[in-house]
Image: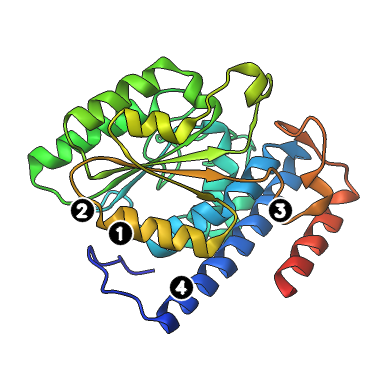
Amino acid sequence: MTALTSTRPPATTADRAERIERIRQAAHRIRRNALDMGEVQGQGYIGQALGVADVLAAVYTDQLRYRPEDPHWPDRDRFLLSIGHYAIALYAALAEAGTIPLEELETYGSDDSRLPMSAMASYTPGVEISGGSLGHGLPVATGMALGLRHLGNGARVFNLLSDGELDEGSTWEAALACAHHGLDNVTAIVDVNALQADGPTVGVLRTEPVTDKWRAFGWHALRVDGNDVAALVDALDELRAHRGSPSVLICDTRIGSGVPLLESREKAHFMRVEEHEWQIARDQLQEGLNR
């Protein structure tokens, strides 16, 4: 894939329809690749990968400027994965983007693989920061965006974080700093799947009304169905044009989206999938694409 231009002309109806279909197909492949990687281990953060696939497809297919053959290109847009355990989803997106070879996904989580179960920048091309401890992504994005501004570099910084990560005070300290410095080259994306390691998010630490909170911190905030590709396209276009303050896109997603077998599974944060279920999941995914 060639690097996207930094500005985009207004889309015609035909352009928009083509973009939506391209993203929808990419999201399907990301989900399929995530299932294939999950089968290698028999378990993992499959539900989150399926849920966030549309968001990743929209960002990588339609928004980011990058060169797959040159992951350290200075003018690239930066995509920071705060939530290191979503690595399985990011690897699938990076394979879709051409940054890592598709066949390398088979090594996911294996000894000596460049694709560890938690994302690490020192291992994997296209991974900007090492994940794991939550609450680090937005502070790093803030510093990165300030540095790019001082360099006169027009690259954008995206940070994907989870609703559970909003429990961390460092996230909100960074949100204040971003707004204070008027960092309109920062776009945060919050995956609100309503589940975290200790249970439903609402029962662990209530974050609603989350959109109002971001706005109170000085951010331009939009909220959409994160599994609605058309809504994602429109929202990301609006955020791309916004100036004067950082932006956040709050995405309500469904754990296991696209695979009914896994959408209703209990204990879905770290999911065990039986050996015979992987092909059922792939079949259901294909049926959904064909509908």
Residue 232 located left or right of residue 5: right
Report the mark closest to the observer, 1 or 4.
Answer: 4
Q: Secondary structure at mark 2?
A: loop
| Disc marking residue 114 | none
| Disc marking residue 65 | 1
Report the mark closest to the observer, 1 or 3.
Answer: 1
Residue designated by label 2: 75
Residue designated by label 3: 36
- Spatial CA distance of label 4 from label 3 is 26 Å
Mark sitting earlier along the chain (1/4): 4
Q: Amino acid at mark 1?
A: Arg
Mark sitting earlier along the chain (3/2): 3
Mark sitting earlier along the chain (1/3): 3
Residue at 81% over, 42% down: 264
Crowding at dot 3, Cα within 10 Å, few <14 / some 14-19 / many 20+, comes out as some
Mark sitting earlier along the chain (2/1): 1
Q: Is residue 284 visible?
A: yes
| Disc marking residue 19 | 4
Residue at 40% over, 34% down: 122
Q: How many marks?
A: 4
- Spatial CA distance of label 3 from label 2 is 33 Å
Q: Amino acid at mark 4?
A: Arg
Q: Is residue 68 visible?
A: no
**In this rendering, is residue 134 above or below 152?**
above
The answer to whether marks 2 and 1 mark residues whose Cβ atoms lie closer than 8 Å is yes
Q: Position of residue 65 (x, y in %)?
A: 30, 59
Mark sitting earlier along the chain (4/2): 4
Q: Position of residue 98 (x, y in %)?
A: 45, 62
